[in-house]
């Protein structure tokens, strides 16, 4: 029998361009540097080709497009935990129902919401290239975003600082949730 991870999985969430992948990788690296078994998963890699193509064309995904992807994300979190590691996943998870879907198979999920203004995120998007997520979808991302609710195990992280500052903030919050 495989032992489940001692530490809860972490979902690094936010709109496109908020830094989920960068912060998620840096967070996983920091946890590994502390001696914790940890695996970073970028949920973008789990999107089916049809979803990627739709977004590449500037068409926002529907909930029906997202359900199979979210189920694949939940399965990946469970697989990482089953191997005895903490999973750090970058995933937009913009709606509460999406986060609840992930929590259904990972009840201990801790959420780090990367929060920033539309102007700041648009500026960041202007200086990056994404495989299939055009900046034209930023407004639909903000329109879809449902902010964290008080009953969600989460930390709201302002992204106006450096990646290192953001990771330190999340690590401090994780220390509190582990206590």
Image (cartoon, helix red, strand yellow):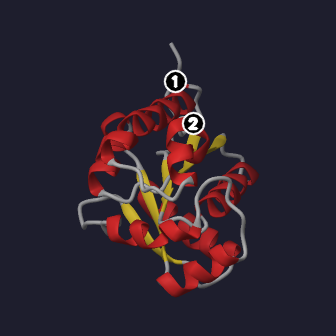
Question: SS for tag 1?
Answer: loop
Residue 80: x %, y % from top left: 57, 32
Q: Are marks 1 and 2 in contact (CB under 8 Å)?
A: no
Q: Residue at x 62, y 68 (%)?
A: 167
The label number, if any, that marks residue 79 in the structure image: none
Q: Quadrant of the C terminus?
A: bottom left
The quarter of the picture where residue 46 lies is top right
Viewer-proximal residue among 59 and 38: 59
The quarter of the picture where residue 165 lies is bottom right
Looking at the image, can residue 71 be seen? Answer: yes
Disc 1 target residue: 3
The quarter of the picture where residue 162 lies is bottom right
Q: Residue furthest right?
A: 33
Residue 111: x %, y % from top left: 43, 58
Left or right relative to 15: residue 88: right
Disc 2 target residue: 49
Viewer-proximal residue among 36 and 55: 55
Q: Residue at x 56, y 45 (%)?
A: 52
């Amino acid at each position: 029998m495989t032992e489940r991870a001692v530490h809860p999985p972490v979902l690094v969430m936010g709109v496109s361009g908020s830094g989920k992948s960068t912060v998620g990788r840096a967070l996983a690296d920091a946890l590994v540097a502390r001696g914790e078994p940890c695996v970073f998963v970028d949920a973008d890699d789990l999107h089916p080709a049809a979803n990627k193509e739709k977004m590449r064309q500037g068409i926002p995904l529907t909930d029906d497009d997202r359900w199979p992807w979210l189920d694949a994300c939940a399965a990946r979190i469970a697989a990482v935990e089953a191997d005895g590691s903490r999973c750090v996943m970058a995933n937009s998870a913009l709606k509460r129902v999406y986060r609840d879907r992930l929590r259904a198979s990972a009840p201990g999920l801790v959420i780090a919401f990367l929060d920033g203004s539309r102007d700041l995120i648009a500026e960041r998007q202007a200086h990056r290239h994404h495989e299939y997520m055009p900046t034209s979808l930023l407004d639909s991302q903000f329109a879809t975003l449902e902010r964290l609710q008080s009953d969600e195990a989460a930390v709201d992280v302002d992204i106006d600082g450096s990646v290192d500052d953001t990771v330190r903030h999340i690590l401090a919050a994780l220390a509190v949730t582990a206590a």
